[in-house]
Amino acid sequence: MTRHIYSIGQQVSFGERVVSYLKRTGVFTITKLLPPLGAELQYRVKSAGEVHERVASEHELQVAELEKPIVAAG
């Protein structure tokens, strides 16, 4: 049995290779691990800026690159 590589609560984004007319930019949080569709593992993801959740296949996702705060030298 194949295991999910992302876990609930982890922040992800859609990879650059995903081409779609749907807006899929920004950071999403994994809210649920879903059963596979065929051989492809799936996730339910939610963006803080949207009211709805999305379903994403594992190959569409990547670990989110979060902005690091700028710390002034002092």
Image (spheres, grey):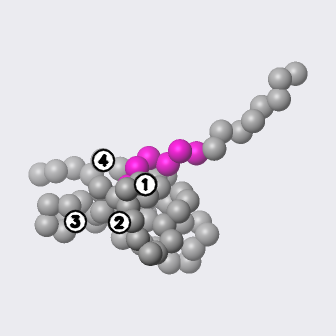
> What's the CA distance linking mark 2 and mark 4?
13 Å
Q: Which of pointers 1 and 2 lies earlier in the amino acid sequence?
A: 1
Extent of the magenta region: 61-66
Toward the right, the furthest residue is: 74
Of residues 30 and 63, the one drawn nearer to the viewer in this rendering: 63
Q: Is residue 9 above or below residue 49?
A: above
Residue at disc 2, secondary structure:
strand
Q: Is residue 67 above or below residue 18?
A: above
State how many labels appear: 4
Q: Residue 36: give x, y in percent of width and height.
A: 20, 64
Toward the bottom, the furthest residue is: 52
Disc sitting over residue 56 in the figure = 2
Residue at disc 4, secondary structure:
loop
Disc sitting over residue 16 in the figure = 1
Question: Are dots 2 and 3 in contact, CB under 8 Å?
Answer: no
> What's the CA distance linking mark 1 and mark 2?
14 Å
Tag nearer the camera, 2 or 4: 2
Q: Which of pointers 1 and 4 lies earlier in the amino acid sequence?
A: 4
Horizontal arrangement in the rendering, residue 41 relative to residue 68 (left or right): left
> What's the CA distance linking mark 4 and mark 3?
13 Å
Question: Are dots 1 and 2 in contact, CB under 8 Å?
Answer: no
Residue at disc 1, secondary structure:
loop
* Residue at image mark 3: 35
Q: Is residue 8 among the parts visible in the rendering?
A: no
* Residue at image mark 4: 5
